[in-house]
Structure formats: structure tokens, C-alpha cells
Amino acid sequence: MEQRLSLITLGVAELDRATAFYKALGWQAGFENGGIVCFQLNGFIFSLYPKTELDKDMTRSNTGTGCFSLAYNVREKAEVDRVLEEALAAGGTLLKPAEEVFWGGYSGYFTDPDGYAWEVAWNEAWPIDQAGHIALG
Amino acid sequence: MEQRLSLITLGVAELDRATAFYKALGWQAGFENGGIVCFQLNGFIFSLYPKTELDKDMTRSNTGTGCFSLAYNVREKAEVDRVLEEALAAGGTLLKPAEEVFWGGYSGYFTDPDGYAWEVAWNEAWPIDQAGHIALG
């Protein structure tokens, strides 16, 4: 298995609500057909799919929030607070205000309308290129 | 907010067990310090972090499996079954055997030792380049 990943799919309660949130963040869908919405990200795809459909596809009932996070790293420390504000303005909920963290960076969390957690972080050790690709320093 | 994402972090019950699984799939860690393990993927980073620490960092108790999936797309249909076999040999569990799917592809699911779901899929519509980056067709 190559060291790569193709898609992250979030199962959402209401596809329209979830889509509106990510679009309000400034994202543009690359594919949407009423049943699924896909966004082209940096080297892979992010998709939103109704929870009932994803449950059926996985043949299990997926419960809770799951213990995972998605992170959006920024290039400058001051951007963390700006992005958190943007996320709240778009309809997200503040989970944890930004703070200095033990590994030397600055980060906070918001949740999307389905409760999925996004960390917004500034980490000088990991460079981000123009295309948004990030690398372990 | 730019249309990109930097990290996916999975909260795991036992860091050593989770790390051993992903290494058994053939992945090499780019950073590990006993507290976190990071893998460089195609344009972003995949990390494993103890669930208790991730709960603390998020300031919430994250429950259940969460309704989300990670997908690994392959270049040829026959690869789907080979990758599922590799995942089971590495200690994964079969969630759904591969089958022809309504959107014209072929896919199945396995779960990692913490129950996180991975889809292995063949989708001719989305090209994968040499570096493993995938694009909406």
C-alpha cells in the first residue's frame, strides 16, 4: 500500500447545511450532484455525504463524533485567530479558543455544523508551499 | 480560508499498536517521539495520537467511531482486492468485501485496530498521478 490517501468523506446529517458551511468558508465544490459534494484539496479530495448513505455504504451504524481532527495550518501566527473568526462567521462553533501550545505553536479548534473538529494551527516547523501542500519539517 | 487541509489526526487507544499497523502496511513514519507519530502523505500529514491526549487537546470527550471514512484509491480494479488482503494481513479487519458499486467503480472497506474505516476503491474517473495526488476528473 503506497503512503498516500485519496479522500476524506464526512457523513453529515444535512447535506445542504454542511455544503453551505464549507462554501461559506470560501471553498468551491468541484463536483456535486445532489447526493454528494466533493472539494478538490491539496493532492486529495474532501467530500460530504449524507450520514445515512455512508452508514449504509460502510455496512455499520457510525456513532458519536469519533476521535479525530482535521487541521488547517496557517503561515503566520496571527492568521489562526482570523481563520477561527471566519469559521464562526460561516456558522461554525468555537470548540477551544486559540492558545500557545506545548509544542511551540499556537492553535485553537472549531467544529463544523455536524460537530467535526477542525484545528487551526500555526506550526513554524512544517513548511506550506504556494499550492498549500505541507511537509514534515 | 484556502481550499486545503494540513493534517488528519486519529485518536488511538494504543499508540504502539496503531503505529505497528500502519507500518505493517508499508508506511514509514517521518516523525515520531514516543508521544505522536506522523506520516508524510500526498500533500498533507497523517498522524496518530493517543485518544486521551486528543480528547484533552480538543477539550471534549470524543465518542464512537464517528461517521467518516478515509479512502485509498487504486489505479487498477484488481488492486482493490490485493490492498484489502494486505490490510487484513497487517492486522486490519474486513468491514465490507469489495463489490461493484452504483457509481461504476469497485470498492470495499477495512477498519484499522481502532475501528477507523478505510475504503479501498477503484474509480476510473479520478486520475492519480505518480506522486499519488488525486484529482476530480
Image (cartoon, coloured by chain):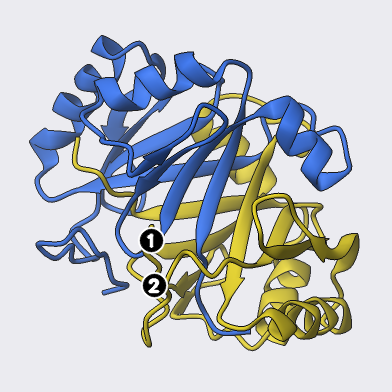
Chain colours: A yellow, B blue
Q: Quadrant of the N terminus of chain B?
A: bottom right
Q: Position of residue B73 (x, y in %)?
A: 26, 48
Q: Position of residue B122 (x, y in %)?
A: 22, 47
Q: Give above or below for A85 relative to A124.
A: below
> Which residue is located at x 57 percent, y 37 percent?
B10
Q: Secondary structure at mark 1?
A: loop
Which residue is labeled 2 in the image? Answer: A42
Q: Give above or below for A80 relative to B53.
A: below
Q: Amino acid at mark 1?
A: Gly
Which residue is labeled 1 in the image? Answer: A137
Q: Secondary structure at mark 2?
A: loop
Q: Amino acid at mark 2?
A: Asn
Q: Are marks 1 and 2 in contact (CB under 8 Å)?
A: no
Q: Position of residue B37 (x, y in %)?
A: 46, 35
Q: In the figure, is residue A128 to the left or right of A49?
A: left
Alpha carbon separation for disc pair 1 and 2: 18 Å
Closer to the camera, A24 or A3? A3
> Which residue is located at x 14 percent, y 65 percent?
B129
Q: In the figure, is residue B135 to the left or right of A44?
A: left
Crowd rating for badge 2 (residues with CA inside 10 Å; few <14, some 14–19, many 20+) = many
Closer to the camera, B79 or B46? B46
Can I make out residue B27 in this image? yes
> Which residue is located at x 24 percent, y 11 percent?
B89
Q: Position of residue B98 (x, y in %)?
A: 29, 28
Closer to the camera, B119 or B59? B59
Chain letter of mark 1 equals A
Q: Which quadrant holds residue A49?
A: bottom right
Crowd rating for badge 1 (residues with CA inside 10 Å; few <14, some 14–19, many 20+) = few
